[in-house]
Image (spheres, helix red, strand yellow):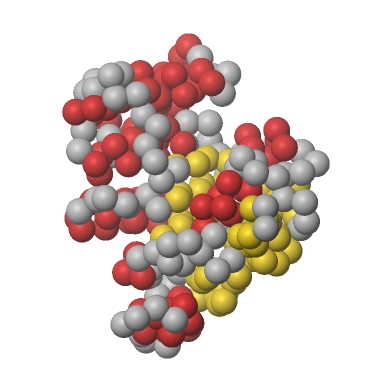
């Protein structure tokens, strides 16, 4: 299927098993929260999805392309916002995006057009001439999402994108990601924060490298997702 498919992924770091038979899929136009406590394996999975690591077992499909057999085609359809910021703080917002466009072989008027389009999509057009270093945390995250969209991916991965942000910025970034899914994009949002998950969201709960639950958040939580999550992961209330 198009969208994102993860089938039977197992991965070891030397003698430690980081992921065990992880399987789930996200259809186009769906927002899926990958919820798990710190150390659950979320970042390891993102490393495999972006081919920073290579799984020896299982299969990953991105927008209809097998990541192992068609890595270039698969990665070309992928947009990524990592937990750690990778912006050049000395460049303007616009220059950051133009540089990223150039890395994808996009230049000239097309790069300018896509940059303007991406910034407008994230409500950042008025910040285009500001240096990235002058932006607050929320606007930097929105800029990173805009940058991840510059090559028009089909699948967007966001790894703990609200870490360190205040409540208002967290809500705004979460809303932007849901809007992108509403426009047809496949969105995988990794988080350890239950309040970032809406009842209607697709939800995958990951703990100690295993999928503990996969379905609609409201049905998994039964009206109390926080309580259900704590019970599943054995975390203290």
> In the image, is 37 to the left or to the right of 16?
left
Q: Looking at this rendering, what residue extends furthest in the bottom direction? A: 222
Q: Is residue 89 above or below residue 195?
A: above
Question: Which residue lies at the image location 70% right of the left edge and 45% below the top edge?
Answer: 54
- Indicate left or right for 74 with 187 as reference: right
Quarter of the image containing the N terminus?
bottom right
Residue 115 appears anywhere in the view? yes
- At horizontal 28% and vertical 19% (from top left) the residue drawn is 90
- Residue 194 position by quadrant: bottom left
Q: Left or right: 214 with respect to 163?
A: right
Q: In the rendered image, is residue 64 in sight? A: no
Compare residues 194 and 151 and report the one nearer the observer: 194
* Residue at the (45%, 43%) spot, across then down: 82
Q: Quick check: 176 above or below 196?
A: above
Q: Is residue 149 above or below residue 37?
A: above
Write the residue at 70% across / 60% down: 10
Q: Position of residue 115 (x, y in %)?
A: 40, 26
Image height of 3 relative to 153, above or below: below
């Amino acid at each position: 299927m198009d969208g994102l498919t993860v089938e039977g992924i197992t991965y070891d770091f030397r003698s430690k098993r980081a992921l065990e038979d992880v399987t789930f899929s996200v259809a186009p136009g769906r927002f899926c929260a990958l919820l798990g406590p710190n150390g659950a394996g979320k970042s390891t999975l993102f490393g495999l999805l972006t081919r920073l690591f290579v799984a020896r077992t299982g299969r990953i499909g991105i927008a209809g392309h097998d990541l192992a057999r068609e890595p270039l085609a698969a990665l070309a359809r992928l947009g990524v916002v990592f937990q750690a910021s990778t912006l050049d703080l000395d460049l303007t917002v616009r220059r950051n995006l133009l540089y990223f466009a150039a890395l994808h072989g996009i230049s000239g008027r097309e790069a300018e057009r896509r940059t303007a389009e991406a910034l407008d999509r994230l409500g950042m057009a008025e910040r285009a001439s500001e240096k990235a270093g002058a932006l607050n945390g929320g606007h930097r995250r929105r800029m990173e999402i805009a940058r991840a969209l510059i090559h028009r991916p089909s699948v967007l991965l966001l790894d703990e994108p609200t870490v360190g942000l205040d409540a208002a910025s967290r809500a705004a970034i979460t809303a932007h990601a849901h809007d992108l899914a509403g426009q047809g994009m496949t969105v995988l949002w990794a988080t350890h924060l239950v309040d970032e998950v809406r009842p209607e969201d697709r939800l995958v709960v990951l703990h100690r490298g295993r999928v503990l639950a996969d379905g609609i958040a409201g049905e998994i939580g039964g009206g109390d997702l926080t309580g259900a999550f704590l019970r599943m992961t054995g975390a203290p209330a």
